[in-house]
Protein backbone atom coordinates (compact mmCIF):
# COMPACT_ATOMS: atom_id res chain seq x y z
CA UNK A 1 0.00 0.00 0.00
CA UNK A 2 1.18 3.53 -0.84
CA UNK A 3 0.98 5.46 2.43
CA UNK A 4 2.48 8.85 1.52
CA UNK A 5 2.79 11.05 -1.55
CA UNK A 6 4.10 14.60 -2.03
CA UNK A 7 5.16 16.95 -4.82
CA UNK A 8 8.32 19.04 -4.51
CA UNK A 9 7.73 22.79 -4.26
CA UNK A 10 9.19 23.18 -7.75
CA UNK A 11 6.68 20.70 -9.17
CA UNK A 12 9.51 18.84 -10.90
CA UNK A 13 9.45 15.72 -8.69
CA UNK A 14 7.07 13.56 -6.73
CA UNK A 15 8.06 11.29 -3.86
CA UNK A 16 6.01 8.33 -2.67
CA UNK A 17 6.46 5.92 0.23
CA UNK A 18 4.86 2.57 1.00
CA UNK A 19 3.89 0.18 3.75
CA UNK A 20 7.16 -1.78 3.46
CA UNK A 21 9.35 1.30 4.03
CA UNK A 22 10.38 1.96 0.42
CA UNK A 23 10.63 5.54 -0.91
CA UNK A 24 10.40 6.21 -4.65
CA UNK A 25 11.09 9.25 -6.85
CA UNK A 26 8.84 10.08 -9.81
CA UNK A 27 9.12 12.49 -12.72
CA UNK A 28 6.00 14.45 -13.84
CA UNK A 29 5.69 11.85 -16.62
CA UNK A 30 5.14 9.35 -13.75
CA UNK A 31 8.32 7.46 -14.62
CA UNK A 32 9.96 5.94 -11.55
CA UNK A 33 13.52 7.33 -11.69
CA UNK A 34 15.00 6.33 -8.32
CA UNK A 35 14.16 4.48 -5.14
CA UNK A 36 15.43 4.02 -1.59
CA UNK A 37 14.34 0.40 -1.03
CA UNK A 38 14.86 0.19 2.74
CA UNK A 39 14.39 3.76 3.90
CA UNK A 40 12.45 2.42 6.90
CA UNK A 41 12.94 -1.38 6.73
CA UNK A 42 9.67 -3.31 7.02
CA UNK A 43 7.85 -0.34 8.55
CA UNK A 44 5.11 1.78 7.00
CA UNK A 45 6.15 5.32 6.06
CA UNK A 46 3.30 7.60 7.13
CA UNK A 47 4.38 10.94 5.67
CA UNK A 48 7.07 12.65 3.61
CA UNK A 49 7.63 16.40 3.29
CA UNK A 50 10.16 18.53 1.39
CA UNK A 51 12.22 21.33 2.93
CA UNK A 52 11.60 24.84 1.45
CA UNK A 53 14.47 24.50 -1.07
CA UNK A 54 13.62 20.89 -2.11
CA UNK A 55 17.21 19.86 -1.36
CA UNK A 56 16.11 17.58 1.48
CA UNK A 57 12.98 15.86 2.71
CA UNK A 58 11.82 14.26 5.94
CA UNK A 59 10.09 10.90 6.35
CA UNK A 60 8.33 9.46 9.40
CA UNK A 61 7.43 5.86 10.04
CA UNK A 62 5.80 3.27 12.26
CA UNK A 63 9.34 2.37 13.36
CA UNK A 64 9.10 5.54 15.55
CA UNK A 65 11.80 7.38 13.59
CA UNK A 66 12.08 10.56 11.57
CA UNK A 67 14.78 10.62 8.90
CA UNK A 68 16.26 13.50 6.89
CA UNK A 69 17.25 12.63 3.32
CA UNK A 70 19.41 14.38 0.74
CA UNK A 71 17.08 14.49 -2.24
CA UNK A 72 19.63 14.58 -5.07
CA UNK A 73 21.73 11.71 -3.72
CA UNK A 74 18.93 9.74 -2.04
CA UNK A 75 21.21 9.53 0.99
CA UNK A 76 20.33 9.51 4.69
CA UNK A 77 21.61 12.73 6.28
CA UNK A 78 20.25 12.41 9.83
CA UNK A 79 18.02 10.18 11.89
CA UNK A 80 16.41 12.44 14.47
CA UNK A 81 16.89 11.13 18.00
CA UNK A 82 14.63 12.27 20.83
CA UNK A 83 15.60 12.88 24.44
CA UNK A 84 13.59 9.96 25.84
CA UNK A 85 14.64 6.48 26.92
CA UNK A 86 14.40 4.89 23.48
CA UNK A 87 17.92 5.61 22.30
CA UNK A 88 17.94 6.48 18.61
CA UNK A 89 14.14 6.61 18.27
CA UNK A 90 12.56 9.95 17.46
CA UNK A 91 9.36 9.11 19.34
CA UNK A 92 8.56 6.38 21.85
CA UNK A 93 5.89 4.96 19.50
CA UNK A 94 4.82 5.12 15.83
CA UNK A 95 5.59 8.48 14.18
CA UNK A 96 2.38 9.32 12.29
CA UNK A 97 3.05 12.75 10.81
CA UNK A 98 5.91 15.15 10.05
CA UNK A 99 5.94 18.53 8.33
CA UNK A 100 8.83 20.83 7.41
CA UNK A 101 8.36 24.53 8.20
CA UNK A 102 7.48 26.52 5.04
CA UNK A 103 10.50 28.84 5.48
CA UNK A 104 12.75 27.76 8.36
CA UNK A 105 14.95 24.82 9.33
CA UNK A 106 12.27 23.42 11.63
CA UNK A 107 10.21 20.24 11.63
CA UNK A 108 7.08 19.38 13.61
CA UNK A 109 6.04 15.77 14.17
CA UNK A 110 3.23 13.86 15.88
CA UNK A 111 3.09 10.31 17.18
CA UNK A 112 1.12 7.48 18.69
CA UNK A 113 2.87 8.41 21.95
CA UNK A 114 0.42 11.40 22.09
CA UNK A 115 3.32 13.87 21.75
CA UNK A 116 4.11 16.67 19.33
CA UNK A 117 7.81 17.40 18.87
CA UNK A 118 9.73 20.25 17.28
CA UNK A 119 13.10 19.48 15.68
CA UNK A 120 16.18 21.28 14.40
CA UNK A 121 16.99 19.30 11.22
CA UNK A 122 20.48 20.83 10.86
CA UNK A 123 21.62 19.83 14.33
CA UNK A 124 19.45 16.68 14.30
CA UNK A 125 18.15 17.46 17.77
CA UNK A 126 14.84 17.81 19.55
CA UNK A 127 13.91 21.38 20.47
CA UNK A 128 10.68 20.86 22.41
CA UNK A 129 8.01 18.29 23.26
CA UNK A 130 4.35 19.28 23.66
CA UNK A 131 2.15 17.03 25.82
CA UNK A 132 -1.26 18.45 24.96
CA UNK A 133 -3.20 15.57 23.36
CA UNK A 134 -4.56 12.52 25.17
CA UNK A 135 -4.32 10.12 22.22
CA UNK A 136 -2.45 9.53 18.94
CA UNK A 137 -1.52 12.68 16.99
CA UNK A 138 -2.57 11.79 13.44
CA UNK A 139 -1.70 14.99 11.57
CA UNK A 140 0.14 18.29 11.91
CA UNK A 141 0.04 21.15 9.39
CA UNK A 142 1.93 24.44 9.31
CA UNK A 143 0.02 27.63 8.62
CA UNK A 144 1.30 29.19 5.36
CA UNK A 145 2.75 32.07 7.41
CA UNK A 146 4.78 29.61 9.49
CA UNK A 147 3.69 31.28 12.74
CA UNK A 148 1.14 28.60 13.69
CA UNK A 149 0.45 24.92 13.20
CA UNK A 150 -2.57 22.67 13.64
CA UNK A 151 -2.65 19.20 15.13
CA UNK A 152 -5.43 16.62 14.84
CA UNK A 153 -5.72 13.67 17.19
CA UNK A 154 -7.61 10.51 18.08
CA UNK A 155 -8.84 12.39 21.16
CA UNK A 156 -11.29 14.09 18.71
CA UNK A 157 -9.62 17.47 19.12
CA UNK A 158 -7.93 19.89 16.76
CA UNK A 159 -5.44 22.23 18.42
CA UNK A 160 -3.83 25.44 17.22
CA UNK A 161 -0.31 26.26 18.41
CA UNK A 162 1.41 29.64 18.29
CA UNK A 163 5.06 29.02 17.46
CA UNK A 164 6.12 32.54 18.46
CA UNK A 165 4.84 32.10 22.02
CA UNK A 166 5.39 28.31 22.12
CA UNK A 167 1.93 27.74 23.50
CA UNK A 168 -1.47 26.30 22.63
CA UNK A 169 -3.63 29.09 21.21
CA UNK A 170 -7.00 27.36 20.74
CA UNK A 171 -8.81 24.00 20.90
CA UNK A 172 -11.55 22.97 18.44
CA UNK A 173 -14.03 20.42 19.84
CA UNK A 174 -16.61 19.78 17.10
CA UNK A 175 -15.82 16.12 16.31
CA UNK A 176 -17.80 13.75 18.52
CA UNK A 177 -17.33 10.22 19.94
CA UNK A 178 -17.38 7.35 19.36
CA UNK A 179 -15.69 7.71 15.93
CA UNK A 180 -14.72 11.36 15.88
CA UNK A 181 -10.97 10.80 15.78
CA UNK A 182 -9.46 13.62 13.71
CA UNK A 183 -7.50 12.08 10.85
CA UNK A 184 -6.65 15.06 8.61
CA UNK A 185 -6.60 18.89 8.57
CA UNK A 186 -5.90 21.44 5.82
CA UNK A 187 -5.51 25.22 5.86
CA UNK A 188 -7.51 27.26 3.36
CA UNK A 189 -5.19 28.59 0.62
CA UNK A 190 -6.71 32.10 0.46
CA UNK A 191 -8.25 32.94 3.85
CA UNK A 192 -5.61 32.73 6.56
CA UNK A 193 -8.06 32.09 9.41
CA UNK A 194 -9.93 29.16 7.81
CA UNK A 195 -9.22 25.42 7.77
CA UNK A 196 -11.03 22.11 7.34
CA UNK A 197 -10.84 18.88 9.33
CA UNK A 198 -11.87 15.30 8.55
CA UNK A 199 -12.55 12.45 10.96
CA UNK A 200 -12.89 8.68 11.12
CA UNK A 201 -16.71 8.89 11.23
CA UNK A 202 -16.75 10.51 7.78
CA UNK A 203 -17.45 14.07 8.99
CA UNK A 204 -15.89 17.07 7.26
CA UNK A 205 -15.98 20.35 9.23
CA UNK A 206 -14.96 23.92 8.43
CA UNK A 207 -13.47 26.17 11.09
CA UNK A 208 -12.40 29.75 11.74
CA UNK A 209 -9.53 30.40 14.15
CA UNK A 210 -11.43 33.57 15.12
CA UNK A 211 -14.36 31.49 16.44
CA UNK A 212 -13.01 28.21 17.84
CA UNK A 213 -16.10 27.33 19.91
CA UNK A 214 -17.81 25.42 17.09
CA UNK A 215 -17.50 24.67 13.36
CA UNK A 216 -18.67 27.35 10.95
CA UNK A 217 -19.85 24.72 8.45
CA UNK A 218 -20.07 21.05 7.53
CA UNK A 219 -20.13 19.10 4.28
CA UNK A 220 -22.98 16.58 3.96
CA UNK A 221 -23.46 13.55 1.76
CA UNK A 222 -26.25 13.00 -0.75
CA UNK A 223 -28.51 11.55 1.96
CA UNK A 224 -27.97 14.48 4.29
CA UNK A 225 -25.60 12.57 6.55
CA UNK A 226 -21.82 12.80 6.94
CA UNK A 227 -19.66 13.77 3.97
CA UNK A 228 -18.36 10.18 3.71
CA UNK A 229 -19.61 6.82 4.93
CA UNK A 230 -16.24 5.89 6.42
CA UNK A 231 -12.91 7.49 7.38
CA UNK A 232 -11.74 10.73 5.78
CA UNK A 233 -8.05 9.91 5.32
CA UNK A 234 -6.88 12.84 3.21
CA UNK A 235 -7.96 16.41 2.56
CA UNK A 236 -6.77 19.06 0.08
CA UNK A 237 -8.07 22.43 -1.11
CA UNK A 238 -8.23 23.69 -4.66
CA UNK A 239 -5.59 26.48 -4.99
CA UNK A 240 -8.39 29.05 -5.28
CA UNK A 241 -10.11 27.69 -2.19
CA UNK A 242 -13.62 27.21 -3.59
CA UNK A 243 -13.44 23.36 -3.59
Image: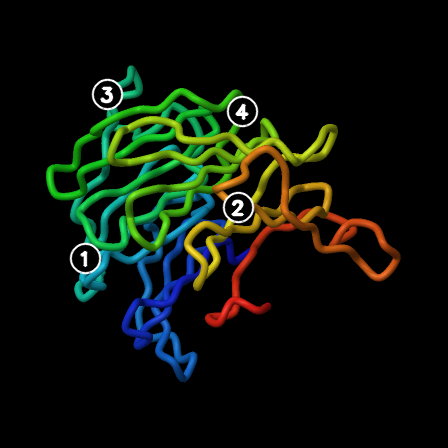
Q: Which residue is mark 3?
A: 83
Q: Which residue is mark 4?
A: 135
Looking at the image, which residue sits at the far right?
223
Which image quadrant: the N terminus?
A: bottom right
Whether label 1 touches label 2, CB < 8 Å: no
Residue at (63% x, 37% y) in the render: 214
User: Which one is in front, 69 or 98?
Assistant: 98
User: Which one is in front, 126 or 225?
Assistant: 225
Which-is-in-front pick, marks 2 and 4? 2
Residue at (56% x, 51% y) in the render: 196
**Label 3 vs label 2: CA separation?**
35 Å
**Label 1 vs label 3: CA separation?**
24 Å
Residue at (27% x, 49% y) in the render: 101
Say which mark, if any, is on residue 70: 1
* Residue neighbourhood size for the residue with mark 4, other residues' Cα within 10 Å, grouped as few (<14), some (14–19), many (≥20): some
Q: Does dot 1 land on a helix, a strand or a loop?
A: strand
Q: Which residue is mark 2?
A: 208
| Sequence-earlier tag: 3 or 2 | 3
User: Which one is in front, 116 or 71?
Assistant: 116
Residue 166 position in % (x across, y down): 28, 28
* Residue neighbourhood size for the residue with mark 2, other residues' Cα within 10 Å, grouped as few (<14), some (14–19), many (≥20): some
Picture layout, residue 2 above or below residue 200 = below
**Label 1 vs label 2: CA separation?**
37 Å
Amino acid sequence: AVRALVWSHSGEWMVSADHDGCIKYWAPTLNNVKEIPEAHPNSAVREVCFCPTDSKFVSCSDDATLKIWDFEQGRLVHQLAGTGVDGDKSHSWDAKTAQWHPEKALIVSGSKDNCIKLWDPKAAREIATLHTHKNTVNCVRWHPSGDFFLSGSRDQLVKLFDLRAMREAATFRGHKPPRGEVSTVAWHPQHAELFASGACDGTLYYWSTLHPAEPIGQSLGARGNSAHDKEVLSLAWHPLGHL
